[in-house]
Image (cartoon, grey):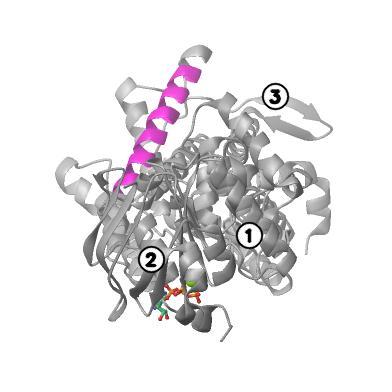
Amino acid sequence: MDFTNLIEGLAGFTVDGLTKGSIYALVALGYTLVYGVLRLINFAHSEVFMVGAWTVLGVYTAVGAHSGVGVWLAIGITLLAGLVAALVSAGTALVVERVAYRPLRNKNAPPLIVLITAIGCSLVLVEIFGHALRVFFGAPFGRSAVNIPTVVPTREVFTIGNFNMSNIDLIVILAAVGMMVALDLFVNKSRLGRGVRAVAQDPDTASLMGVNKNNVIMLVFIIGGVAAGLAALLHTMKYDFAKFDMGFLIGIKAFTAAVLGGIGNLRGALVGGLLLGVCEVYSSALISSNWEDVTAFVILVVVLMFRPTGILGESLGKARA
Amino acid sequence: MLLEVKDIVLNYGKIEALHGLSLEVGEGEVVSLIGANGAGKTSTMRAISGVRGVSSGQISFNGENVTNLRADQRMRKGLVLAPEGRGVFPGMTVVENLEMGAYTRRDRAAILSDFERVFELFPRLSERKKQVAGTMSGGEQQMLSIGRALMSRPKLLLLDEPSMGLAPMLIQQIFSIIREIAQQGTTILVVEQNAKQALTLADRAYVLETGNIVKTGKGSDLLTDTSIREAYLGVA
Ligand SMILES: Nc1ncnc2c1ncn2[C@@H]1O[C@H](COP(=O)(O)OP(=O)(O)OP(=O)(O)O)[C@@H](O)[C@H]1O
Ligand SMILES: [Mg+2]
């Protein structure tokens, strides 16, 4: 255990962890929202994220982006990539819901069937990006990671002692927290958000209030998809690659974050994500980076032992402001 | 007729709960449906509100066939159910629950005046605006459920056992409020096990036994009917 290493670099490790955790939190949103409304663990959500990363690469390639463009152009290209990624990810999530989940729901399929279908959708999407697209389009699709050009170069924004805050970390954390706050306000304060909570708490009674359940479900998939697309953009800004199976580990971590915070609970996704990110980075500073993934699950098990419903407790509706 | 239910059959899997039930509710009427436990009262309300589909038969509302509409579509037409066992949203406050009642409405000013109306009918609710519904007493939840249904300005208000689980004092109070709602011009179909209150309240009533209507008539006539008195009013 290298405590001096951790203490000396504490600020830097914390920021690193928050950056990682912000991305987990954004992806966790999708799991938590869908679970809150459908009691379904949407395993295909990790691939909604992966599709977002490829979309960012696609946009950068289409506009010929590189690190030499000016500040304003870089901002413009990044925003455009984020917008397109959000749309494509949301579209992917929506297609999965309409093609796979809704028909099963209409037939009152048992939960296990839906779960297996979710895993199947995930595998199909992975293989589309890891195999099928290569057959038709060739490079860059394939089974190895593809580099994504840096549009916004890393710069120090400010320095405190021996710690430098980079622009990328700042953007990632602010964007994630901003999106979470906006979503929290939407769900807790708006009319439509109330409809989402109503379906989460009691779908039959919600329909008696005139809420169209299928519209709420689609809305939830769209919001989760937008968050995943945004997470993908932030991920490429920090880690600059796309890969057909990149969703797997992040998906599992984000799902862990959702459970850690209390699945079905929006604020829980944020708390769980940030906590997970920070703990991972601390543990790799203390022991070694090989232990990161182990740490994530040790924390999950320990927290669930003491609080089986997660840190902030369960569902969308019940755990409220 | 505002509501016409014709020969509906309702199944839960292989179990048939309603065997071709028919009933009618006219504009401005208060109609009650009485019957013992398991007679099919809640099933009738589910079928009318659209929470459960029927296997055959027809339901018309306001002259329109609504048999194939979903519950939320029927609700938008003014067919509004306050379900059995209250069914308030447990994680929402009193005000949020009432807002849910007005979910389909956009006329903000009128909604605000309806809030006032509900708070006048149920002063208990106005003292507890910010309380989370799941923590309220059974009687308070019942009031909230009825108040929430009123927030949508129903053409026909369906009440499934508004007196369930309430103390006698509170039952009196709930029924006098229902009477008040009716006098203010809302058509009501109320399901009850509390036959005495229900028959006193109603213009007309139906008696339901194991999925079939076995008797119908004016509320006051059924109150004095000997077989009804024996079976439902506990007097020989
Ligand atoms: N979800 C269900 N699945 C299977 N059977 C059901 C279901 N709901 C009701 N039933 C059956 O249908 C019949 C009618 O039930 P229903 O709830 O309509 O009765 P009720 O008149 O409302 O009774 P209570 O006064 O106890 O509320 C009963 O035999 C009941 O067991
Ligand atoms: Mg009942």
Residue A56 shows in the view: no
Which subunit holds the residue at mark 1? A
Q: Tell me: B77 left or right of A129.
A: right
On whether disc 3 and disc 2 are found on a single subunit, the reply is: no
Q: Main secondary structure of the magenta part?
A: helix
The residue mark sitting in front, 2 or 1, is: 2
Residue denoted by label 2: B44
What is the spatial separation of the Cα atoms under label 1 and label 3, in whole angstroms?
34 Å
Q: Judge: label 3 CB < 8 Å from ligand 1.
A: no
Task: Tell me the crowding category of disc 2: few under 14, some 14 to 19, or many 20 or more residues within 10 angstroms, Cα based.
Answer: many
- Which residue corresponds to the image point at 27% horizontal and 44% vertical from the top-left? A141
Where, quadrant-wise, is the N terminus of chain A in this rendering?
Answer: bottom right
Q: Position of residue A191 (x, y in %)?
A: 54, 36
Q: Nearer the viewer, residue B180 or B75?
A: B180
Which kind of residue does numbered mark 3 sit on? Answer: Val
**SS for dot 1:** loop
Q: Is residue B141 magenta?
A: no
Residue denoted by label 3: A157
Which kind of residue does numbered mark 2 sit on? Answer: Thr
Q: In which quadrant of the rendered view does residue A57 lie?
A: top left
**SS for dot 2:** helix
Which kind of residue does numbered mark 1 sit on? Answer: Gly
Q: Nearer the viewer, residue B39 or A290?
A: B39
Q: Earlier in the sequence, mark 1 or mark 3?
A: 3
**SS for dot 3:** strand
Residue placed furthest toward the bottom: B236
* Range shown magenta: A74-95
